[in-house]
Image (cartoon, rainbow, N blue to C red):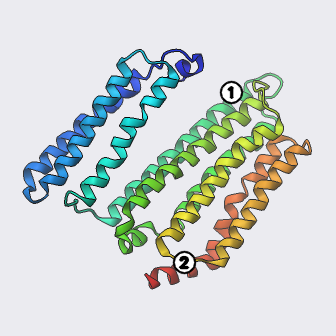
Amino acid sequence: LFESVHAGDRLHNEIVIAGYVVMRVALCGHWLRAWRQDPSRRRAHRTYLVSILTAQVLWCVIAVLPLTVPVAFAAMVLPLVVELIGPFIAERSAGGTPWHADHIAERYGLLTIITLGEGVLGTVAVVSAIVEEPELGWSLEPILLLAAGIGLTFGQWWTYFTIPWAEVLQRRRDRSFLFGYGHVVLYAAIAATGAGLHVAAYFLEHHSELGEVATVVSVVIPVGAYALVLYVLYNAFVHAFDMFHVLLIGLTAVLLVAAVVMAAASVPVAWCLVVLALAPVVTIVGYETIGHRHVSHHLDAL
């Protein structure tokens, strides 16, 4: 897939689509079972089933046709819209399905951990490749990169679970789609953070054409996006404007800007990433000292 994108000719995503076909076949089986065993909600079950099958057929058509990369990505808009709008129609216009807030929050939390885990594995793998370079080895820069990568990942994990998502979702069940689709952006930011750390590793290996500032920015942007989306999601659920959150976001922004300024001042990239890894610590300290009381107050007010 990535090689075909890099080549810019035909998109080869057959293996990816095949994996989704395997999962979708099993998922359709579950919806068929639900349709059979729960007659009162058959309309919603049918809507889910039709949307899943329709989207899967469209994905398969895109995989089979000899489409160039730009055309293929443009064509993906249609199945993506079907994927997103199908559940909305099923829940809002077709009677909906019962769901347990604790279970949903747990599933999304586990997906968050999986996404964070990919960043850890990627960081370790890239650092392992770096230390094998004769001119680098176990020097200070790879060690700092490893510390920054693990620190950022752990910090993002901690900040995510400072929010009692199950309780929030239970009180605001009407915002379930905001919760679900908002997590798509959250996962993208986490994955992009790992990708940015890969870019930094390539820079240290001298395999990158980017400069110091661009390398640091490639990590700063997803880290900042993750923090911002997390705060926006929380405040969208609790309907509370908290000046303490504004302070925490401001301090986080200071660290993000500081990392870029350090890179512009020719400070080694590894040290810039160490400063960047402190960004989630702002939220962690804020929550553990004062913020947890604010969260309790917000939940009580719902």
**In the image, is 218 to the left or to the right of 163?**
right
Residue 223's x, y, as percent? 66, 51
Q: Which amino acid does label 2 sit on?
A: Ala
Q: Give the distance between the C-alpha atoms of the residues marked 1 and 2, in whole angstroms.
A: 47 Å
Regarding residue 163, the answer to whether it shows in the image is: no
Q: Which of 222 and 119 is in front in this view?
A: 222
Regarding residue 256, the answer to whether it shows in the image is: yes
Query: Circle 1 — which element?
Result: helix
Residue 254's x, y, as percent? 79, 61
**Residue holding disc 2:** 240
**Residue holding disc 1:** 129
Which label's residue is closer to the chain start, 1 or 2? 1
Q: Which of 6 and 61 is in front in this view?
A: 61
Residue drawn at point x = 53 percent, y = 70 percent? 235
Q: What residue type is labelled 1?
A: Ala
Residue 232's x, y, as percent? 56, 64
Residue drawn at point x = 61 percent, y = 50 percent? 153
Q: Residues within 10 Å of mark 1 (few under 14, many from 20)?
A: some
**In the image, is 66 to the left or to the right of 203?**
left
Q: Which residue lies furthest to the right in this view?
A: 265
Number of numbered discs overlaid on the protein picture: 2
Compared with 281, 191 (above or below) is above
Residue 191's x, y, as percent? 56, 43
Q: In what quadrant of the picture does the C terminus appear?
A: bottom left
Q: How crowded is mark 2: few (under 14 residues within 10 Å), some or many (20 or more)?
A: few
**In the image, is 278 to the left or to the right of 161?**
right
Q: Which of 165 and 233 is in front in this view?
A: 233
Residue drawn at point x = 41 percent, y = 56 percent? 180
Q: Which of marks 1 and 2 is in front?
A: 2
Quarter occupied by residue 251: bottom right
